[in-house]
Image (cartoon, rainbow, N blue to C red):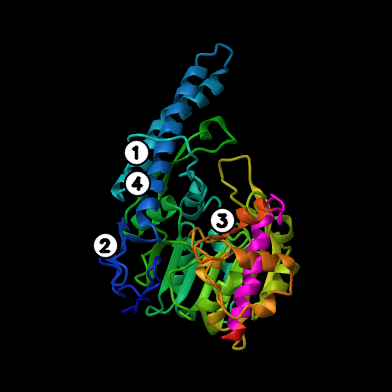
Amino acid sequence: MTETTAPLCPACRAQLPALLWDEADIVCGSCNAKYPYLLGIPLLLSDAETQLLAFRKSLTHFLRETTHAQSVVLSQLLQEDLTPRARSRSQLLAEALPLHRASLLELCQNAGIFPLDELDETPAHALLAYYSLIHRDYAWQPEVDEVAPALSDLLATCPTRDDFGRTLVLGAGTGRLAWELASRAHQHDEVIALDINPLPFLVTQQLRRSKTLELWELPGQPRKSTWAAVQRTIHPPGPSPANLQLIFADALQPPFAAASFDTIVTPWFIDQVPQNISTFLPTLTALLKPGGSWLNQGPLIYDPARTQPVHRYCADELIELVVQAGFEITKASYDPTLYLASPVSSQARREFVLTFHAQRLASASPPKDLLPSWLTHDSSNAEPAPVLDGIESALSLHPLVVHLTHLIDGQRTIQELTRQLIASGHLADDEGAEVAVRFCLKLLWRASLKSS
């Protein structure tokens, strides 16, 4: 029987019950925080109810958008100059949209995610943000198979292809890669897949229960008029591995203790999720046991809205960061590949994919060097910066450090400290202001560690 890893409470970091897969609400014995299940997947986020509300909001937006899209297509069908094939294509799309809408609504409602009665106009996460991955991972084969080559390339970097030990997959997408790894691992080696996007995990969870789904693929640029809407059968790729666990959780702050895992896998993750890879590496290092493995696969394509230019690391720069973080790169490749090449679409992406295996050295930074939650760059928690002792050695490093220390009272958050420094004229009001404050706070925090 697989030994399950006891997670930590996202709110207070106390240990939660190890046997949490019975679909009763998970309750923290320390802070009484409750974490529900969605279709048997635990929702381990510090404010689970807020996140569930966000899921409902995304669903509501999706329902409204698809209803509107159908009405637009139906009105455009009234144009007289349409060719017969164009009219047939548009009619196909108009008929498929309500079926597409109904299938995803049923899936979400089965998981306890229901649309809201009222909806404000604030932005919501797009429910279909990674919808194409569902079709890629479970429906395009054998016409187009992107799963097997990617898995083969990843395993080719591993010293051993089936001895992963306890494994954590961060930003797991649909969880298909985690499924394949769990199928190849020893039965007692648990594979945990983390993600925050609901729809792909809900589909995979249905497949794990030996259910097939009928979902619609709606390519934006179909290659043929009859492919404007294609109904796909989503089916399990094989028997569901008993050692696989799916968890809704923040992959930037995984709810697990230091040194919990033998292997960590980051597929198409490190360039898209962390705002700065270098600030995330200590978290990854701390989660791994000494000698543990890090498997990475994906391109380095950054979102300009999230990642500043100086943090958009090239492959050689990333390798340098990985080594500095206490890893040895044992094998790596950086080759072009087709990505999201749907068999019914005229579009596909060609990306250079960086795949590597890195081993955490025993001399890597100990877990105590993991940044505290109040200082984590990607933290969504508005935790105040605490008053730190023994920081005298850092005060001479930069004038801004001195000004900052006068403002730290144990109540102000990093965002509030930043606003104070901007108002007093010590910082320019631009996107680099908070970055500078965080850097100064790291200097102070590290100085306090050295003095303790």
Residue position for label 4:
108
Is residue 320 found left or right of 438 in the rendered image? Answer: right
Which label belongs to residue 416? 3
Mark 1 touches mark 3? (CB < 8 Å): no
Type of secondary structure dominating the magenta stretch: helix
Which label belongs to residue 222? none
Give the residue type that dot 2 points to: Asp
Which label belongs to residue 116? 1
Is residue 431 found left or right of 74 in the rendered image? Answer: right
Q: Is 406 in the magenta?
A: no
Quadrant of the rendering where the C terminus is positioned: bottom right
Residue position for label 2:
25
Mark 1 touches mark 4? (CB < 8 Å): no
At numbered mark 4, what does the secondary structure look like: helix, strand or loop?
helix
Give the residue type that dot 3 points to: Glu
The earlier-in-sequence mark between 2 and 3 is: 2
The residue depicted at 66 percent of the width and 60 percent of the height is 435
